[in-house]
Every structure is written in C-alpha cells, then in structure tokens.
Amino acid sequence: MKTVMGTVLITEEEIRRRIGEIGRQISKDYAGGAVTLVGILKGSFIFLADVIRAISPEIPVEVDFMAVSSYGDATKTSGTVHIEKDLGISIEGKDVIIVEDIVDSGLTLFHVYNILSARGPRSLHVAALLEKPGNSKYEGTLDYVGFKIPNKFVVGFGLDYAQRYRNLPDIRVLDEI
Ligand code: IMP
Ligand code: MG
C-alpha cells in the first residue's frame, strides 16, 4: 500500500497481536514476581503503553523512563551515550526489562544495558518492538522482539523522522526522506 505517508510495513493489527503475545510471555516469565519496565525515550512510549496493558494485572508492574542521546560515530565500536534524563527510581534488586523502540546498530542498547546493569538489578532483560539486522554492537540477548525488519528507515508507532510521524498507528517505510 502506497500513501503520501509512506508504505505500510507492519499493520496496526499485526502490531496489536504481537504485543499481546509479548505481554502474555512476560506474564508467564514473571509470574509470582514483579517487574520494572524502563522505557527509553522518546521512541518507546507507545510500545511501552501497549505492552504494560498486555501484562497480567496480577503482576506488580513499575514503570520509569530514561532519555539518552548518542554521541560520536556509530561506525566506531565504542561511541558513548549521554543521559539526558535519568530514572527517578532505584532498580537495585529489581527484575528489570529495558523497553526500546528499535535496535539498529545496537550501540544505544549496549550503553543503556551497561549503565543499568551497574546499578545492581536482580535481573535485566530487553524488549524491543523492532530489530534491524546489523545490531552487532549489542552482544546480549533480545529477550522479547516484536518484529525483525529489513535495514530500512521506518517511522510510526512512536518512531520518528526529525520528530515527525510518531503518531502513525502502524510502521511505515518513508518513500522519500
Ligand atoms: P542504535 O543505537 O543504532 O541501535 O539506534 C537506536 C536508536 O536509533 C533507536 O532507539 C531510534 O531512536 C533510532 N533509530 C534507528 N533506526 C531507526 C529507524 O528506522 N527509524 C526511526 N528511528 C531509528
Ligand atoms: Mg530510541
């Protein structure tokens, strides 16, 4: 389907169904315990809002957000991130899931994972709505992945191009950017 807003790659219905599955899986994995979701701003806010409501109400769920900006050259192996907004809660001793919109090079996740890991959570896992093929900078496991997508720039469902298109209800590839 072609529109002025781009070509739909993943429909609303597909996203809804997949997030339901992820919510059920998290509910099984954390049954009898509690979970703290850490959303990485801004792109993850819509995914997180849907995932949190797909988790069983019997599981106590905490949520907080962190904003980071990437510095340096993503083609380098190191790079770094700057914490623009830090968590307001302690994650020490907690079972934490990092919630990301998309893992591309994996550099952001690599740094966020290390920062949060150093704070002594009891466990630290990762949920990402989208995964691109070249995420070599993060060598850990993506525990919950919505969709693997081709190496194309996508927008919608929280993801932006120059701060636009986050409100699209589906995931689209822009025709011309
Ligand atoms: P990484 O550090 O290369 O994995 O990039 C992660 C961040 O880059 C994501 O959290 C997004 O904010 C942004 N990003 C990467 N690919 C896309 C895309 O296709 N559309 C929108 N944002 C993207
Ligand atoms: Mg992001």
Image (cartoon, helix red, strand yellow):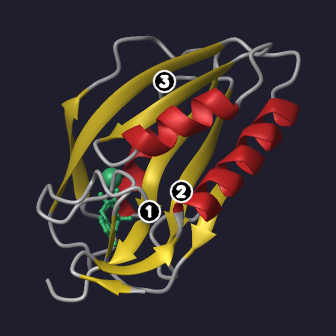
Q: Residue at x 33, y 31 (%)?
A: 66
Residue 142: x %, y % from top left: 64, 58
Q: Is residue 55 visible?
A: yes
The residue indicated by pointer 3 is 119
Give amino acid for label 1: Asp
Q: Is residue 140 visible?
A: no
Residue 170: x %, y % from top left: 44, 62
Q: Residue at x 37, y 62 (%)?
A: 107
Disc number placed over residue 86 in the picture, else none: none
Q: Earlier in the sequence, mark 2 or mark 1?
A: 2
Q: Are marks 2 and 3 in contact (CB under 8 Å)?
A: no
Characterize the local packing of mark 1: few (<14), some (14-19) or many (20 or more) Cα atoms within 10 angstroms: many
Q: Is residue 120 left or right of residue 153?
A: right
Disc number placed over residue 129 in the picture, else none: 2
Q: Secondary structure at mark 3?
A: loop
Q: Residue at x 76, y 16 (%)?
A: 59
Give amino acid for label 3: Arg
Q: Nearer the viewer, residue 149 or 72?
A: 149
Characterize the local packing of mark 3: few (<14), some (14-19) or many (20 or more) Cα atoms within 10 angstroms: few
Q: Earlier in the sequence, mark 1 or mark 3?
A: 3
Residue 75: x %, y % from top left: 26, 80
Q: Quadrant of the C terminus?
A: bottom left
